[in-house]
Structure formats: structure tokens, C-alpha cells
Amino acid sequence: MTAVAIANIFADPVDGTRYRLDDPAVRAALVAEARRQLAHDGCAILPSFVTPKAVARMAGEVMDLLPHAHRRDLLLRAYPGEPDESVPAGDPRRRATPFAMNSVATDQFDPDGPVMRLYIWDGLTRLVADMLDEPLLYRVADPLMSCNATILGDGDQHGWHFDSNDFVISLLLQAAEAGGRFEFAPAIRGPGDENLVGVAAAMDGTSPLLRQPPMAPGALILFRGRNSLHRVTPVLGARKRIIALFSYDRRPDMHFAERSRINVFGRSQPIPRQPARPGGAAMPSSA
Ligand SMILES: [Fe+2]
């Protein structure tokens, strides 16, 4: 990326007065604070990371794609595979919660649009790695899930689940009028310890681990979702909740499982791009 392009990114989506990432001391303090929050709270929040203007542009881009988004309205469990009928009915492995949402895939975004421009910025990838105390992270290579967005309307919700990757960044682009809160139980399970009693308590709303961190549009949220049970509570009101999700991995070629792509987007392969029409942008062929 050229110096001009970097300067444009600093001048454009990221609030360069609040986040002076080109100042090593300021950046180091930011990284230290994010690590402290991750250790203490289970997530790190960078409020107003993206300027209101850029947030509005990104929200507009996602809303323009809503007619082409994949709609899910079903009950899903937090665990993969078929439910084990031999375990008691209240066991979290048998519980299913509503997934009612619209999802926009990576290949539906304009590669030069505001959302993708932020995601493919190497400076953000390096910042995320530093905040997560990882020596090197890559943007995941998945053609559908690496950068995606979810849109939740009135009554929609994103049920309880664990992520299948370690690192995800959320960028809230538009909040609901009410509800639509991100709720999670940090590190409620770990390698070799599924803590099913604790997970059941979280699903019941009685776990002391449960948190609903405050977040406003423009906030960047770092979160380790593989072992932290999480959901988005039901949205109330006409204003849609819009969030962009950026995924990272320690490997440069990480792809999600085909079944994950089908679950989220109803397809496993990217849609071939149509050549741009004179005077108009190329659109996915599902348009
Ligand atoms: Fe998730």
C-alpha cells in the first residue's frame, strides 16, 4: 500500500484524532489497554474507532446489499453435529435458539467499497494482532466469510453459539432502537472442559459471567469467540441492527468449513462477478 493510500485511510474511516496510530507511543498505549480489557473483560472495545461519516457510508453499503442477503430463520444449537438424544432435555447440547437474521457475504461487497477497504488495510490487521498479543495474523482466505455483515430487523436475533475461529472483530454500523445487545460469557469453556453446567446457566440467563458490553456505532470490538458463548438479543423497533464482522487467523490460508458457509449464506461458492456495465457497478448475479 502506498503512503498516499495509508494517509487516505487515516484521513478517512479511522478517527485519526482519537486514534493516532502513526504515533508509536500512542499506539503502544492503545495496544496495552486492549490487552488489559481482553484479559479482564473478555473483549476489548475501541469506541468511535471509525468516524460517523465512514460508519454512515458503510451502513449504507450494507443496507444496499440487504435485498441480496441470505435470510435465515431457524433454530440452531450451539454445538456441531447431530443432537445426542441420550443426554437430558435441559442439556445445552440439545438446546436450540433462534437464528433470525440476514447475512451479506464477502463476495457481495465492492472490493473498493468502504467496508472492504477497511478490512483489507494491513494496518488494521497488524493492530488486531498486536492487541491480541499474536506475533502475526492473517485475514482469513474464505471467499464468503472473511468479511461479512449481519442485518437484524424487528424481532430478529442471533442465537447462542460458539465461533469456529479464534479471532473476530465486530464493527457496529447501526444500533437497534432497543434490544440487539451483544451478550457473552467469556471463556466459559476451555480445551478439555466443556463446562456444560456453566453453559446451561448462561443460556438460562443466570450465569455470573454474562456481560452485555456497551457499544455504539463506530466501535470496534475484539472478541475471542471460540470458547465464549455469545448471542445477540432480540431486536426491537424498526431501525435495523447492522454489524460488520472481520475474521483473522494464524494461518494465511484459513477457510471455514463448507457446511458453515452453507449454514450462513445458503451456498458454499462465491458468485462469479459480472462485468461492470457502463455507468453502473457490477452486481452479484443473484441480484
Ligand atoms: Fe459469533
Image: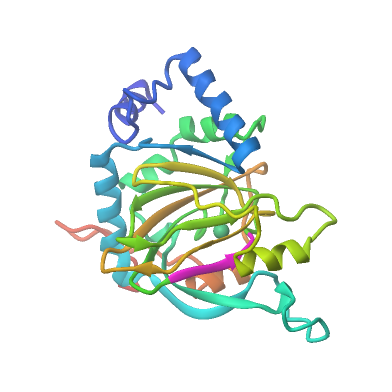
Say left or right for 267 vs 19: right
Image spot of residue 261 (x, y percent):
55, 67
Secondary structure mostly taken by the magenta-highlighted segment of the chain: strand
Please, which colouring scheme is shown?
A: rainbow
Q: Residue at x 49, y 13 (%)?
A: 25
Tell me, yes or no, whether the highlighted magenta stretch contains residue 159: yes
Tell me, yes or no, whether the highlighted magenta stretch contains residue 135: no
Image spot of residue 74 (x, y percent):
51, 81
Q: How many marks?
A: 0
Q: Quadrant of residue 55?
A: top left
**Taking 23 as reference, is 247 above or below it?**
below
Say left or right for 256 vs 56: right
Q: Looking at this rendering, what residue extends furthest in the bottom direction?
A: 85
Can residue 33 be seen here? yes
Q: State which region is magenta.
A: 157-162
**Taking 138 as reference, is 271 above or below it?**
below
Image spot of residue 191 (x, y percent):
81, 53
* Depth order, front residue of 143/53: 53
Q: Residue at x 40, y 37 (%)?
A: 47
| Quadrant where the C terminus is found in the figure | bottom left
* Depth order, front residue of 234/269: 234
* Depth order, front residue of 279/211: 211
Say left or right for 160 vs 190: left
Q: Quadrant of residue 154?
A: bottom left
Q: Residue at x 53, y 57 (%)?
A: 183
